[in-house]
Image (spheres, grey):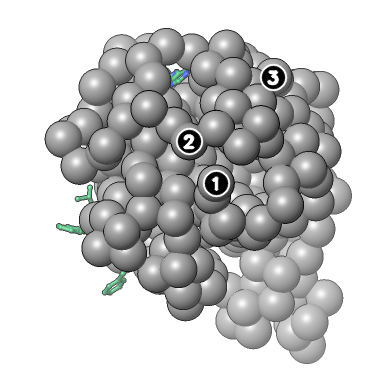
Amino acid sequence: MYQRIVILTGAGISAESGLKTFRAEDGLWEQHRIEDVATPEGYWRNPELVQRFYNERWQQLQQGVEANAAHRALARLQQQFHGEVLLVTQNIDNLHQAGGSQSVLHMHGELVKGRCPKSQQVFPLTQPFGADNLCTCCAIGQMLRPHVVWFGEMPFGLDRTYDALAKCDLFIAIGTSGTVYPAAGFVEQANQAGADTLEINLAPTERYSQFDFHRKGKAGTLVPEVVEQILAGQLLS
Ligand code: BJW
């Protein structure tokens, strides 16, 4: 029976809620250049373009995107599992919380927050990013930047995640292509700890061979099944 589980989620877990992934044919990176919208250099070159990119995604969340069966099943696992569960998401949406999760480590930040670029203080986002959405921490208000992690920036909570990976006996990656580090390297850390590793994805990823077990299909169908199996004390096979 497992005692300590680390779960990593990516854009694929929110796809069935209607949010675009990044690297699909109709994904976010098909419509936007990464260096323009997902790097600090791109932001300072053209803040309006980047603000528009995040404002559109923020507005989609405000319009009532709902958690799906996979988010809800993970919340159930967190509530009912006898041991420890660390839920780490690369997603900046708030669908794990909407699905009932109380504790979520957002390693790439959160769409519902803005950050002062000077003091690094984080604010809830109550209106879209723009010239009139300023911090209240500085004498002269600074334009809030998205509270997200772009390429070349340090993801959040890595110490806690690596600590949990070093002790875990089960690692599950759900709906992530495994192309972006450091998250792409988590399976290796889990393998070094001797954990069982499971990939749940629509299709085999670049990391396929590093996982012990695979479930191929939609997260909304497979995650509830896997959660039931874990809660029933069955080892994966
Ligand atoms: C389903 C499904 C369904 C669909 N059911 N499945 C060379 C080697 C190693 C590292 C590097 C390197 N060169 C550069 C680096 C570092 C760099 C990096 O990894 N680059 C790679 C491109 C190589 N990484 C960084 O810079 C990171 N920081 C860092 O390393 O700091 C250390 C450091 C800093 C400074 C100095 C020195 C060291 C930061 C990475 C930040 C990533 N940011 C983004 C944007 C966040 C904000 C936003 O959302 O806009 O994060 S990029 C984007 O990719 C986003 C995602 O979180 C991330 C991962 O994407 P994800 O979730 O995997 O989505 P997809 O679309 O790729 O995949 C979806 C999957 O779901 C697919 O597999 C589908 O099949 C599946 N799926 N529907 C189940 N229904």
- Residue to which mark 2 is pinned: 235
For marks 2 and 3, give the one nearer the viewer. Answer: 2
Residue 138: quadrant of the picture: bottom right
| Amino acid identity at mark 1 | Met
Disc 1 vs disc 2: Cβ atoms closer than 8 Å? yes
Above or below 126: residue 120: below
Q: In this view, does 116 lie to the left or right of 216?
A: right
Label 1 to label 2: alpha-carbon separation = 6 Å
Label 2 to label 3: alpha-carbon separation = 22 Å
Q: Is residue 131 left or right of residue 97?
A: left
- SS label for mark 1: loop
Compare marks 2 and 3 and give the one earlier in the sequence.
3
Label of residue 69 in the image: 3
Label 3 to label 1: alpha-carbon separation = 24 Å
Residue at 80% across, 51% down: 102
| Amino acid identity at mark 3 | Ala
Q: Does the residue labelled 1 lie within 8 Å of ligand 1?
A: no
Residue 123: quadrant of the picture: bottom right
- Residue to which mark 1 is pinned: 1
Compare marks 1 and 2 and give the one earlier in the sequence.
1
Above or below 38: residue 205: above
Query: Can residue 143 be spotted in the picture?
Result: no
